[in-house]
Amino acid sequence: MITVHLHNVILFAHHGIYDEEKINGNTFEINLDVVYDDDEENVFENIEHTISYEDLFVIVKNEMQTPTPLLEKVCVQIINKIKKKHPSVKEANITIYKLQAPIEGFKGKAGVTISKKFED
């Protein structure tokens, strides 16, 4: 098994349930781990022998650009797009943190994690 990681990805987006979030947006931190079966030969001589982290970033970036009320839905959408594009994926784990959560007096980051295993 191989895991491709994208960690500490910072993107600006307009996700949230409050009007202020939809208008002003927020900064988000995304951590993504994608697990897939490797080729028995383990050739790894070109990008076709693996899942490109650049390709994963494009999927994440595109989904983050679509305003969505709940981060849970954003996570599921990202995982589904990855699985559709890369059927060899066996597991995906994604965490999205909202870095300036609109909670009075709150310091830190708030977020969600969704993990999905695929039985093909």
Image (cartoon, helix red, strand yellow):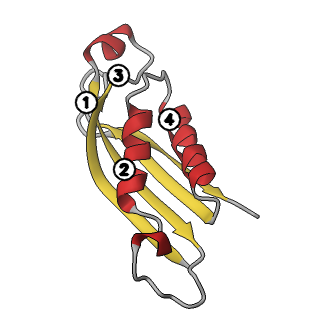
Q: Name the residue under label 3.
A: 14
Give the mark nearest the N terminus, 2 or 1.
Answer: 2
Q: Label 1 is placed on what type of residue?
A: Gln
Q: How crowded is mark 3: few (under 14 residues within 10 Å), some or many (20 or more)?
A: many
Q: Residues within 10 Å of mark 2 (few under 14, many from 20)?
A: some
Mark closer to the chain start, 2 or 3 = 3
Pointer 2: what residue?
Answer: 57
Neighbour tally class for label 1: few under 14, some 14-19, many 20 plus, Cα within 10 Å:
some
- Decide: is 95 above or below 74: below
Picture quadrant of residue 108: top left
**What residue sits 50% from the left and 27% below the top?**
70
Which label's residue is closer to the chain start, 3 or 1? Answer: 3
Please tell me which residue is depicted at 25% across the width and 43% down the height of the picture.
10
Mark 2, secondary structure of its residue = helix
35 up-or-down from 2: above or below: above
Hey, which quadrant is residue 54 in on the image? bottom left
Whether the residues at callouts 2 and 4 have beta carbons within 8 Å, the answer is: no
Dot 2 amino acid type: Phe
Residue furthest out toward the right:
120
- The answer to whether 113 is drawn above or below residue 72 in the figure is below
Q: Which residue is rendered at x = 43% and y = 82% of the image?
A: 44
Observer-nearest of 109 and 91: 91
Residue on which the image places disc 1: 100
For the residue marked with disc 4, what is the amino acid?
Answer: Val
| Residue assigned mark 4 | 74
User: Mark 4 or mark 3, which is nearer the start of the sequence?
Assistant: 3
